[in-house]
Amino acid sequence: MQRIIDAENSDLFDVLAHVAYAMAPLTREERAARAKVEISTHFNSKQQAFLDFVLAQYVRVGVEELSQDKLSPLLRLKYHGAIADAVADLGQPEEIGKVFVGFQRYLYQPPIQSGL
């Protein structure tokens, strides 16, 4: 389906929105760029650095990188296997989990319309 509508670099969400509502699909890169604006206002600099890394993986690989079971491998990759460094930068595991799950809403929320 993604190939049919020329949306191979988009999420299934965008494909379905295109089919159901004739919305132009966003690429993962466009979706990540929009999310970065919100991330910069809701997360501290160390969290932003980690989330930028996660977004780069998401753009490169796909939405499966946002799965909860990918959190530990992403932390190991970003921090070169040093989970203690991740905890020092990002907080306790519960907090890291909240950051990882919490930022994802910014990927799929509609952009804020100005001047309305």
Image: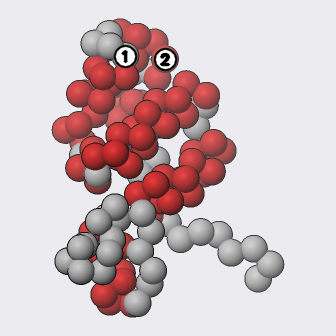
Q: Are marks 2 and 1 in contact (CB under 8 Å)?
A: yes
The residue type indicated by label 2 comes to Asp
Q: Where does residue 102 sit, x and y in percent of width and height?
A: 43, 47
Residue at the spot x=28%, y=20% of the render? 76
Q: Which residue is mark 2?
A: 89
Q: Where does residue 56 sit, x and y in percent of width and height?
A: 42, 40
Residue 106 seen in this snapshot: no
- The residue closer to the viewer here, 60 or 90, is 60
- The residue closer to the viewer here, 23 or 6, is 6
Earlier residue among tags 2 and 1: 1
Secondary element at image label 1: loop
| Furthest residue in direction bottom, as rendered | 21
The way the protein has been coloured in the rendering is: secondary structure
Q: From the viewer's perspective, is residue 50 above or below residue 99?
A: above
Q: Which residue is mark 1?
A: 79
The residue type indicated by label 1 comes to Tyr
